[in-house]
Image: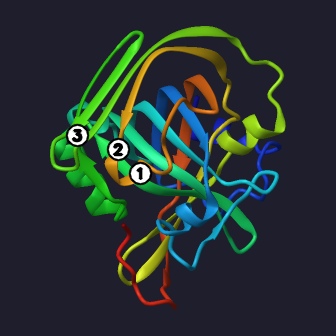
């Protein structure tokens, strides 16, 4: 599907598509979503004060998303698979900034050192390298420095053709907000609505010591998707008005 074809389908978006035709293309494929309902005071310790934590029926959520990034490239250039294709794990929560709702990354890992270096340099997102392996029905990640460990074994279920409001709230996000010492950076993205499947988690180890009070026990909800084709715009930098506070 070409840039123009993706941009024509916008009825599912909560706000108008940004001006211009986008700066980057990428695919987020074979995505596993694990979702936990969490405690608000605990979550606030990890989120910049400039951003408002978004709530669903009065409760905040944190999600772990494990997937494969493919064909990432600038708009008018070809992709280069040694950098463009890599496995990723991100841990995110849901926030608001002004009239837009989006996601905020608590953690973001990539399975190739060079890809992490390039992505971090261009986007300022907090990419770090982790050892990641995936097969048809398993996903594993480990990071010695942070003592993080993830192991998922799963079976796919039937397509979810009747998504409820929480399903959509957790997956249909078209903005990302991330902090640096001097700015809050905003990124807009566009893709078609996620098609999701049910997923049966057969074995799960999620050990992220920094987030042990947020991610614990079995997830409250899980999804799987074959993926989406994504158009992304460049970052918009907004100067911080609150002194930088190192996240826990």
For this rendering, which residue is in front, 92 or 69? 92
Whole-percent x, y for residue 150 in the image: 34, 31
The answer to whether residue 146 is left or right of residue 210 is left
Whole-percent x, y for residue 28 in the image: 48, 33
Marks 3/1 in contact by CB < 8 Å: the verdict is no
Residue 174 in view here = yes
The label nearer to you, 3 versus 1, is 1
Classify mark 1: helix, strand or loop: helix
Q: Earlier in the sequence, mark 2 or mark 3?
A: 3
The answer to whether residue 39 is left or right of residue 202 is right
For this rendering, which residue is in front, 234 or 161? 161
Residue beneath label 2, please? 208
Q: Residue 219 occupies which quadrant of the picture?
A: top right
Classify mark 2: helix, strand or loop: loop
> What's the CA distance linking mark 3 and mark 1?
17 Å
> What's the CA distance linking mark 2 and mark 3?
13 Å
Residue beneath label 3, please? 130
The answer to whether residue 246 is left or right of residue 67 is left
Residue drawn 59% across and 41% down? 36
Residue beneath label 1, please? 211
Marks 2/1 in contact by CB < 8 Å: the verdict is yes
């Amino acid at each position: 599907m070409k840039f123009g074809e993706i941009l024509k389908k916008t009825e599912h978006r909560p706000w108008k598509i940004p001006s211009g035709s986008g700066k980057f293309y990428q695919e987020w494929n074979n995505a596993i979503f694990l979702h936990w309902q969490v405690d608000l005071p605990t979550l606030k310790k990890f989120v910049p004060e400039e951003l408002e934590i978004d709530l669903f029926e009065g409760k905040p959520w944190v999600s772990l998303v494990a997937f494969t990034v493919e064909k990432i490239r600038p708009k008018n250039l070809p992709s280069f698979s040694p950098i463009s294709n890599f496995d990723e794990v991100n841990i995110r929560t849901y926030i608001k900034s002004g009239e837009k709702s989006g996601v905020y990354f608590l953690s973001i890992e990539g399975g190739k050192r060079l890809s992490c270096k390039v992505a971090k340099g261009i986007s300022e997102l907090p990419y770090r390298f982790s050892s990641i392996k995936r097969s048809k029905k398993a996903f594993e990640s480990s990071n010695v420095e942070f003592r993080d460990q993830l192991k998922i074994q799963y079976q796919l279920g039937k397509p979810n053709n009747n998504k409820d409001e929480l399903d959509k709230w957790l997956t249909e996000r078209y903005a990302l907000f991330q902090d640096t010492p001097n700015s809050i950076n905003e990124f807009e993205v566009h893709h078609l609505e996620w098609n999701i499947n049910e997923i049966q988690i057969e074995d799960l180890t999620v050990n992220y010591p920094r987030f042990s009070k947020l991610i614990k026990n079995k997830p409250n909800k899980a999804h799987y998707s074959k993926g989406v084709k994504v158009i992304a715009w460049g970052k918009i930098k907004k100067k911080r008005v609150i002194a930088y506070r190192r996240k826990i």
